[in-house]
Image: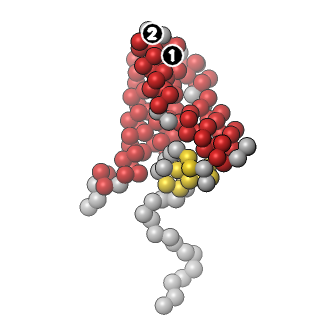
Amino acid sequence: MITVFEKPNVLLKLEGLAVFLLALAIFWQQSFSWSFFWSTVLLPDLALFGYFINTKVGARLYNITHSKLLPSALAVGAIVMSNALFLVLALIWFVHIGFDRMLGYGLKYPEGFKITHLGAIGKVVGEPRRSFLPCWK
């Protein structure tokens, strides 16, 4: 039997779930504003407008806003400066990224929106292609 540790895509989706739950739990524990949460949680997806220019720009903007690098830097800055607004924004950003990863939306390649580091969106990795035609021998 194959374990989850032998399926990198499943493991990466579980890591997304962990980031999502951790950031959400800290947000809730700190009693931050849920109205602010709901009004900002989709802001990273504004990067998708880059796809109107071309797939290379779209992928680059998406990856900038959906990598954990910038929210990590923002969180460190929030802690160092004791800035609650920066912490709230970093947590919401982590929630967004974790949720996307959990659903299988990975970082994009310039070849197209559906080509991600987690595999092609909408395709189950390792699943054989099935044809609606009968198999002829």
Return the residue at label 1: 86
The numbered mark, 1 or 2, whose residue comes first in the sequence reads: 2
> Which amino acid is tagged 1?
Phe
Q: Where is residue 99 in the image (x, y as percent from the top left)?
A: 49, 37
Label 1, label 2: how far apart the Cα atoms are: 9 Å
The residue shown at (28%, 59%) is 2
Q: Position of residue 131 (x, y in %)?
A: 55, 75
**Image vertical order of residue 10 relative to residue 41, above or below:** below
The residue shown at (50%, 70%) is 129
The number of discs equals: 2
Q: What secondary structure is found at the residue carrying circle 2?
A: helix
The residue shown at (31%, 51%) is 4
Q: What secondary structure is found at the residue carrying circle 1?
A: helix
The reply, left or right, for residue 128 in relation to residue 56 is left
**Image vertical order of residue 24 relative to residue 98, above or below:** above
Return the residue at label 2: 81
Mark 2 surroundings: few (<14), some (14-19) or many (≥20) residues within 10 A: few
Query: In this rendering, does residue 119 appear at all?
Result: yes
Rendered image quadrant of residue 53 = top right
Give me the disc on residue 20.
none
Answer whether labels 1 and 2 touch (C-beta < 8 Å): yes
The reply, left or right, for residue 10 in relation to residue 104 is left
